[in-house]
Image (tube, rainbow, N blue to C red):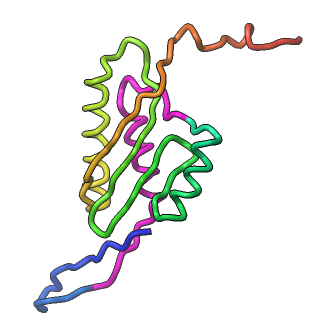
Amino acid sequence: MTEVITTTNNPGHGTPQLGKTTISDEVVAQLVEIAAKEVQGIHSIAQQGIGEQIAGLTQRLSGKWQSGQGIAVEVGEREVAIDLRIIANYGVKVSDLAVRLRLAIIERIESLLGLRVKEVNIQVSGLFFPEDKPTEEHSRRVE
């Protein structure tokens, strides 16, 4: 969990510190997920395998939060670093997708939380082919 110290000019007073605002790592990860879902060309956020989940437990104990999804965040007092694994739609130019995704995440975190985004590392761990999506009649084994 990170603490963001909020200082606001108090009308008529010169130097107020009104208190602390604490932002959990999970909130940052939720905003990353929301921003990612709004970017065209992303099929989904990649799920973690069991090995990564075990590694994530170690990272959580060391202060780096990692969701069951492919999102890991490390939040300091004023900065945040983000690692994100995605599945991209086939046919999308991945370099352009990464730029749009990075900008969407940075804009969301900086505007809503006031934290500076130090880095957004994106791993494209798979491609989604529309014909891979099972239809309901083919997915049923029994009637």
Residue displayed at 65% across by 41% down: 50
Q: Which of 108 and 26 is in front in this view?
A: 26
Q: Give the range drawn in magenta.
A: 18-46
Above or below: residue 30 compared with residue 115: above
Residue displayed at 30% across by 49% down: 108
Is residue 94 toward the left or the right of residue 73 in the image? left
Q: Where is residue 78 in the image (x, y as percent from the top left)?
A: 27, 66
The single residue placed furthest to the right in the displayed view is: 143
The N terminus, quarter of image: bottom left
Above or below: residue 116 compared with residue 91: below
Across the whole image, how many numbered discs are drawn on residues? 0
Q: Which picture quadrant has residue 103?
A: top left
Q: Position of residue 111 (x, y in %)?
A: 25, 55
Q: Which of 123 and 14 is in front in this view?
A: 123
Above or below: residue 55 compared with residue 75: above
Is residue 60 toward the left or the right of residue 22 in the image? right
Asked if the magenta segment contains residue 100, the reply would be no
Asked if the magenta segment contains residue 43, the reply would be yes
The single residue placed furthest to the bottom in the displayed view is: 13
Residue displayed at 31% across by 70% down: 77
Above or below: residue 31 compared with residue 58: above
Q: Which picture quadrant has residue 21?
A: bottom left
Q: Nearer the viewer, residue 41 or 55?
A: 55
Q: Which picture quadrant has residue 116?
A: bottom left
Q: Position of residue 133 (x, y in %)?
A: 60, 14
Residue displayed at 37% across by 41% down: 35
Q: Position of residue 84 (x, y in %)?
A: 42, 40
The C terminus, quarter of image: top right
